Image: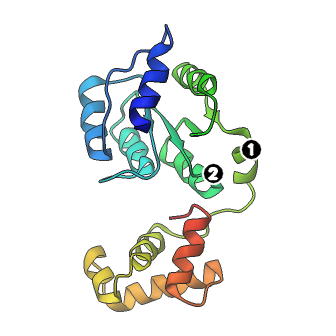
């Protein structure tokens, strides 16, 4: 529903043309390679690939497509990770339609478009987690055992325990589930 609504809002604009709509991150990568859009709108949470992973994929492949994340997650950690992954814009879904259209135009012209309140907040607290700690915490938050996490990440159980212990210490949590919850709330997962 949101996908169709965003497309319809942008199609109203005379200078913006929607060339495709993907239902998940993997489909978005395929469509981006085929259609070569100037600007790609994505969400943070999607099936098969997050919006941050999608932005990183576009960047890694050297595509000229600029990525704008439009999401409900007003979390500074997500914004920082999105920008680090190569996103050019980060807006909240409750932004007025004219803000979205303006953001697409700004990003298309090579500028950034970032929710100003979130931008100010983003430069406060830095994400202390490493990529491996983040991966282990994400899986721990899903209720996976240490053995399951080790298998999924191709690591030993001892290494996984070390990553989880480090992550717990960094976020000030007593359990790995609590650490996952804290990291998710701050936008670090």
Which of the 4 image quadrants contains residue 179?
A: bottom right
Number of marks in picture: 2
Which residue is painted at 32% across and 45% down in the image?
25
- Res. 174 in view: yes
For residue 166, the mark is none
Q: Is residue 12 left or right of residue 156?
A: right
**SS at badge 2:** loop
Which residue position is annotated with label 1?
Answer: 117
Q: Nearer the viewer, residue 11 or 91?
A: 11
Q: Residue at x 54, y 67 (%)?
A: 184
What percent of the width, then of the height, locates residue 107? Answer: 55, 26
Would residue 134 appear left or right of 110 to someone viewing this image?
A: left
> Would residue 48 appear left or right of 82 to someone viewing this image?
left
Image quadrant for the N terminus? top left
> Pointer 2: residues within 10 angstroms few (<14), some, or many (20+)?
many
Quadrant hosting residue 57? top left
| Residue 160 point in image, percent of width and height | 39, 84
- Residue 61, quarter of picture: top left
The reply to whether residue 39 is in sight is no
Q: Camera-side residue: 3 or 150?
A: 3
From this view, report whether residue 14 is shown above or below residue 109.
above
Disc 1 crowd, CA 10 A, few/some/many (<14, 14-19, 20+): few
User: On the picture, is 150 further left or further right than 130?
Assistant: left
Between 181 and 154, the one nearer to me in the picture: 181
* In this view, 156 is above or below 129: below
Residue 133: percent from left, percent from top: 47, 74
Please tell me whether residue 129 is drawn above or below residue 101 in the rendered image: below
Q: What's the residue at 27%, 45% (across, down)?
A: 26
> Cβ–Cβ below 8 Å for labels 2 and 1?
yes
x then y, percent, for residue 147: 29, 88
Q: Which residue is mark 2?
A: 74
The residue sitting at the top extreme is 14
């Amino acid at each position: 529903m949101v996908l169709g609504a965003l497309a319809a809002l942008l199609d109203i604009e005379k200078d913006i043309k929607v060339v495709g709509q993907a239902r998940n991150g993997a489909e978005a990568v395929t469509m981006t390679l085929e259609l070569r859009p100037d600007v790609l709108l994505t969400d943070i949470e999607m099936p098969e690939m997050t919006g941050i992973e999608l932005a990183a994929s576009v960047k890694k492949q050297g595509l000229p497509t600029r990525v704008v994340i439009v999401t409900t997650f007003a979390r500074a950690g997500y914004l920082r990770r999105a920008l680090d992954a190569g996103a050019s814009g980060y807006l909240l879904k409750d932004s007025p339609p004219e803000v979205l259209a303006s953001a697409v135009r700004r990003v298309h012209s090579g500028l950034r478009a970032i929710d100003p309140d979130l931008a100010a907040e983003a430069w406060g607290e830095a994400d202390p987690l490493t990529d491996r700690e983040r991966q282990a915490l994400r899986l721990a938050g899903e209720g996976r055992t240490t053995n399951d996490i080790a298998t999924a990440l191709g690591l030993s159980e001892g290494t996984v325990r070390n990553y989880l212990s480090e992550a717990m210490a960094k976020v000030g949590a007593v359990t790995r589930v609590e650490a996952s919850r804290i990291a998710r709330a701050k936008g670090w997962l």
